[in-house]
Image: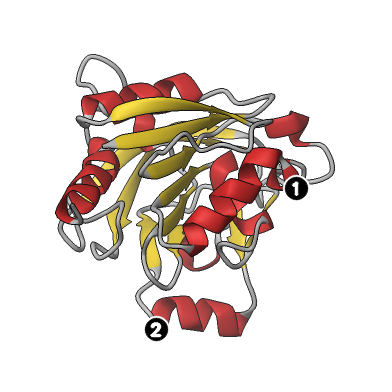
Amino acid sequence: MRLGVVTFPGSLDDVDAARAVRIAGAEAVPLWHGDHDLRGVDGVVLPGGFSYGDYLRCGAIARFAPVMTEVVEAARGGMPVLGICNGFQILCEAHLLPGALIRNDHRRFVCRDQRLRIESTTTAWTSAYEQGQQVVVPLKNGEGGFVADGDTLDRLEGEGRVVARYVGANPNGSLRDIAGISNASGTVVGLMPHPEHAVESLCGPGTDGLGFFTSAVRTLTATI
């Protein structure tokens, strides 16, 4: 399996995402923001960081990067795509996911190990978990509050598209404690916390984040 990891100007976590892909047993393929070529990958990871300096809005400029033309087309064709933190913001700006990520309600950057509850295991990126399983992964964001109108929130809930919720104190004011969502088919997932920082016992809070990447490998292997 070949999972592409996109690097934008200002990406911070592309190297960590690539390492997580390799630990999960897939080949990590570097993709450049200025290219119109996905290099034959089977899935894509949009990593965290501050793409294009977060000018205008987080993810608003990255959404128009040349590579995103290919990512959007591939995602609409069923390719698994995971957006982490800034990647989640880009997915929302590209209208692959509904809603938006806004400034944390306490107006401060937050960085901590965060407990999550996995709400859906039917996505391409969460099938390795048990529904209701609690995991701990790092969280680091200044614009991590997920918002959407009431009808959209109800639809996400009703269709089982809330992928993960914050457990304990809500770190950023996300409505309904939402930490991650998916598209209708479960192939595209946006997640504000950083599972790529929890894939090795030597570093971080443990290996609870690895399941997001092994899930994709499992999903793609099953389609062969």
Seen from the viewer's position, the closer of residues 35 and 55 is 35
What residue is drawn where x is 43% and y is 47%? 82
Q: How is the image coloured?
A: secondary structure
* Residue 92 appears in view: yes
Q: Is residue 175 above or below residue 28?
A: below
Name the quadrant of the N terminus. top left
84 is higher (above) or lower (below) than 50: below
Nearer-the-camera pick, 53 or 215 = 215
Residue at the (26%, 28%) spot, across then down: 199
**Mark 2 falls on what kind of element?**
helix
Tell me the residue that label 1 is attached to: 60
In-front residue for pair 71/23:
71
Q: Looking at the picture, which amino acid does disc 2 mark?
A: Gly
Disc 2 and disc 1: Cα gap in Å?
Answer: 28 Å
28 relative to 89 in the view: left or right: left
Q: Secondary structure at mark 1?
A: loop
User: In the image, residue 156 lies at what x, y percent?
Assistant: 46, 76
Q: Please indicate whether residue 57 sits to the left or right of residue 111 in the image.
A: right
**Mark closest to the chain's N terminus, 2 or 1:** 1
- Please name the residue shown 22% across and 14% down the image: 202
Q: Which residue is mark 2?
A: 158
Q: Nearer the viewer, residue 106 or 75?
A: 75
Q: Residue at x 44, y 42 (%)?
A: 44
Q: Position of residue 190 (x, y in %)?
A: 48, 53
Q: Is residue 55 above or below residue 181?
A: above
Q: Residues within 10 Å of mark 2 (few under 14, many from 20)?
A: few
Residue lying at the far right of the rendered structure:
56
> Looking at the picture, which amino acid does disc 1 mark?
Ala
The location of residue 198, given as percent across then percent down, is 30, 29
